[in-house]
C-alpha cells in the first residue's frame, strides 16, 4: 500500500498535521494515529511526552474524528471503507517521510485506541522493517485472527501496552496480536497493566520515549 494506490475513501484529502523537527531537517519520523473522537493535534500533544530532537511528527486526521464506524472486533467488512482509507492515510504519511529522505526503518508508528488498532493493522498488512510500532490500548482488527499473516517484520520493535480490564480492548486480543507479530519476526514487548482502564500511563510513555531515542542511533 502506497500513495500510488487507488484509494479514495473518507480520510483521503484530510490534513496531515506536522510538528517538532521539520521533515527536511529530521533523521527519523513518528506517524501518530489518534483514537475515536479525537484529533491529530491531540496526538501531537501526547508526543511531547515521547519526542526527541531530530524526529518529525506526522499525524493524519480521520474524517469525522473516526477511522472506522464499528468496534475493531467486528467483521472487517463492517468497518469499510474507513479501515482501508485509514491504512492509506498511514501509507501516505510514511511516503511523506520517504520523500524527505527518511528511510522506513527510521519511521515509527504510534497509535492510541482506535489509532493503535489501525497502526497495528497497517504493520501486519505491510510487512517490512520499520522503526517500530507502539500500540497503546489496541490490537489487530477483525472478528477473529485465525488467518495467516505472511511477511517478515525483520525484528521491528513492537510495544503493546494495555490494561487487563480495558473496556474496549479485550486482554485476549492483545495476546493474539502479540502472537501474530511474533510469528512475523517482530521484536515484541507486551505489557498488561492491572486495573488501569482505557488510557496511557507513565511506564508506557517512558518505554515509547526509549524506542524513539533508538531511532536516532547510528
Image (cartoon, rainbow, N blue to C red):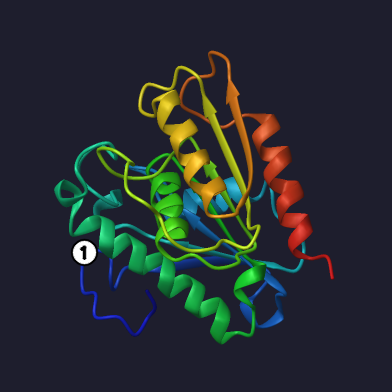
Quarter of the image with the C terminus in it: bottom right
Q: Which is more toward the observer, 38 or 121? A: 121
Q: Name the residue under label 1.
A: 10
Q: Which residue lies furthest to the top in this view?
A: 195
Residue that appears at 44% across and 66% down: 126
**Residue depicted at 29% across the width and 73% down the height:** 13
Percent of width and height locating residue 182: 56, 46
What count of labels does the image hold?
1
Q: In the picture, which quadrant includes the N terminus?
A: bottom left
Decide if residue 136 is on the left or right side of residue 211.
left
Mark 1, secondary structure of its residue: loop
Q: Where is residue 109 in the image (x, y as percent from the top left)?
A: 54, 57
Residue 63 screen position, x and y as percent? 26, 58
Query: Which of the 4 image quadrants contains residue 51?
Result: bottom right
Neighbourhood count class around disc 1 (C-alpha, 10 Å): few under 14, some 14–19, many 20 upward = many
Residue at horizontal 59%, vertical 21%? 193
Q: Where is residue 107 in the image (x, y as percent from the top left)?
A: 61, 67
29 horizontally vs 117: left or right: right
Compared with residue 206, is residue 66 higher up or lower down, i.e. above or below?
A: below
Residue at 60% across, 65% down: 130
Residue furthest left as drawn: 78
Amino acid at each position: 500500500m502506497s500513495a500510488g494506490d487507488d484509494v479514495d475513501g473518507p480520510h483521503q484529502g484530510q490534513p496531515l498535521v506536522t510538528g517538532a523537527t521539520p521533515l527536511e531537517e529530521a533523521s527519523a519520523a513518528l506517524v501518530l494515529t489518534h483514537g475515536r473522537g479525537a484529533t491529530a493535534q491531540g496526538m501531537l500533544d501526547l508526543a511531547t511526552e515521547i519526542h526527541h530532537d531530530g524526529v518529525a511528527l506526522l499525524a493524519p486526521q480521520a474524517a469525522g474524528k473516526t477511522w472506522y464506524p464499528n468496534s475493531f472486533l467486528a467483521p472487517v467488512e463492517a468497518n469499510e471503507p474507513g479501515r482501508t482509507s485509514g491504512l492509506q492515510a498511514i501509507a501516505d504519511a510514511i511516503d511523506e517521510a520517504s520523500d524527505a529522505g527518511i528511510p522506513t526503518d527510521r519511521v515509527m508508528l504510534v497509535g492510541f485506541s482506535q489509532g493503535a488498532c489501525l497502526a497495528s493493522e497497517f504493520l501486519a498488512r505491510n510487512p517490512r522493517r520499520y522503526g517500530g510500532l507502539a500500540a497503546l490500548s489496541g490490537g489487530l482488527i477483525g472478528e477473529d485472527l485465525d488467518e495467516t499473516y505472511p511477511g517478515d517484520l525483520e525484528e521491528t520493535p513492537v510495544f503493546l501496552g494495555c490494561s487487563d480490564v480495558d473496556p474496549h480492548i479485550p486482554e485476549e486480543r492483545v495476546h493474539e496480536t502479540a502472537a501474530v507479530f511474533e510469528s512475523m519476526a517482530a521484536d515484541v514487548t507486551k505489557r498488561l497493566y492491572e486495573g488501569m482502564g482505557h488510557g496511557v500511563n507513565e511506564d508506557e510513555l517512558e518505554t515509547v520515549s526509549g524506542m524513539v531515542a533508538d531511532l536516532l542511533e547510528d
